[in-house]
Image (cartoon, grey):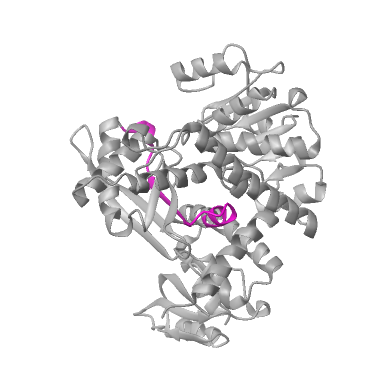
Amino acid sequence: MAELLALPRVSFASRQASTCVERALSTWTWAGQIHDASGLLTRLRVERAPRSRRSATLATPQNLEVAAAVGVISLEAMEIYNHPTFRMACQQFDLAADHLNVPEADRARLKFPKRSMSVALPIKRDDGGVEVFTGYRVQHHLTLGPTKGGLRYHPEVTLGEVAALAMWMSWKCALTGLPYGGAKGGITCDPHKLSSAELERLTRRYTQEMIPFIGPQTDVMAPDLGTNEQVMAWMMDTYSMHMGHTVPSIVTGKPVGLGGSVGRREATGRGVGYLISRTMDVLGRDASKATAVVQGYGNVGSVAAFSLAKHGVRILAVSDVNGGIRNEKGLDLWKLEKHNAEHRTVVGFGEAEPIPNDQLLESPCDILVPAALERQITQANAGRIQCRILAEAANGPTTPEADAILEQRGDIFVIPDILCNAGGVVVSYFEWVQDLQSFFWTETEVVDKLFRILEGAFTQTLNLSRKQKISMRLAALSLGIKRVQEAKQTRGLFP
């Protein structure tokens, strides 16, 4: 199956250089255009070469001419997604695809996003000036239904990161049996430096730009890092005004009074707590004697901490973007919650001492919950992690290199991200269903249905892990990827 390589536009200094590129490409089956010094290398359609003939070297403007000069060129598909997190997601996919023996002809279609959007978002600032932000949306696949995924506001948002998160969401939805493909969106901004009015204008502009590509049966957004119920309310209102009638099912994670679901805000953290409890049952651990450390005391991390504390787990340390705190005797979460509400940070809490983030991750504990950003546990620190259960409340907190170290150690039970933090999208699905039917459930019904779905996914993943003697991550990825692959095979390829 052909892959479309969207490479940078590259100018060559001489006809000889462009000829070398053409000669190097003759080892591949390709169709495209290469021009001389006055022209540009644009797009190439390349058939997958055998593994022995592929190269992992990145094709960039800086190295293309060097490669051409020696008669060798290296190509990487979908250069527009080039980002460490996307490469990490692809590594995970490749490992699972190898384990499943996915045919080469199916891999590119499973791996790469179906649709990606990048939009310019000019807004008026409160001081009267105009600033242009960049927004993204990636829809990974629509084979099983509409795409589903959050919208994040963060200064480091890129298209590659968003594409990786969309891919993980695809496997997460398939693992839990939801009728969705994965999606993710983001705006490159610092929401803490924008006023409420500026955030509203930015959100509404982004929604307007996305209207041709979203809808209750096409793509449904939800809150993520830096966004909340209010952002979803603005999105719903903008879309509804465009349609001429109220469309609550266009987003999930909105206020209950606008068609949101009870239990949605707590769903991800509550699911993390449930799966940790189930893991402790499997390992024969007593929750009342267990300790935990939580990196990222936001919505997910705080709810997870409270869920664990309710079962008797002692929370030793937590952190947020400003720093970490630790108390060997255990943190009083209710007092910490009051401090956090007043100061908007855990730093400075009177009943704890400060602790750097790297030391927090390496603190001795029974349960470590990374609930912040991607790539926090790496090859550099994986050997020093001192926990029995690693519960990945964040997306992609552990790199493949760190995974290999943890698997070799064999003393840490990993609850992989696509399982561990699936509670949020599960209850988002419940909210979407309730909105479509205009029939709403009680919180007891929501929580009961959530735990049933998580229990099923956890049991299937654990059984496959034990049966095939593979890691929990590989088992979870294999289940999700296989279901998407089978759905694509059954539907066929149009046209």
The reply to whether residue 64 is in sight is yes
Q: Based on the picture, tell me whether residue 176 belongs to the magenta stretch.
A: yes
Q: Based on the picture, tell me whether residue 493 belongs to the magenta stretch.
A: no
Residue 55, horizontal then vertical, whole percent: 62, 73
Q: Is residue 418 above or below residue 281?
A: below
Image quadrant where residue 365 sits: top right
Q: Residue at x 75, y 35 (%)?
A: 280
Residue 302, horizontal then vertical, whole percent: 55, 28
Residue 292, horizontal then vertical, whole percent: 69, 28
Q: Locate residue 308 relative to residue 494 in the image: left or right.
A: right
In this rendered view, identify the residue nearer to me: 399 or 141: 141
- The residue at the far top in this view is 350
Q: Locate residue 225 relative to residue 414 in the image: left or right.
A: left
Q: Locate residue 286 relative to residue 166 in the image: left or right.
A: right
Where the C terminus falls, by quadrant? bottom left
Q: Is residue 450 above or below residue 491?
A: above
In this rendered view, identify the residue nearer to me: 191 or 113: 113
Q: Locate residue 136 relative to residue 415 in the image: left or right.
A: left
The reply to whether residue 469 is in sight is no
Q: Residue at x 29, y 48 (%)?
A: 206
Q: Residue at x 36, y 48 (%)?
A: 436
Image quadrant where residue 431 sits: top left
Q: Is residue 28 above or below residue 400?
A: below
Magenta stretch in the rendered image:
170-194
Q: Residue at x 81, y 46 (%)?
A: 409
Q: How many marks?
A: 0
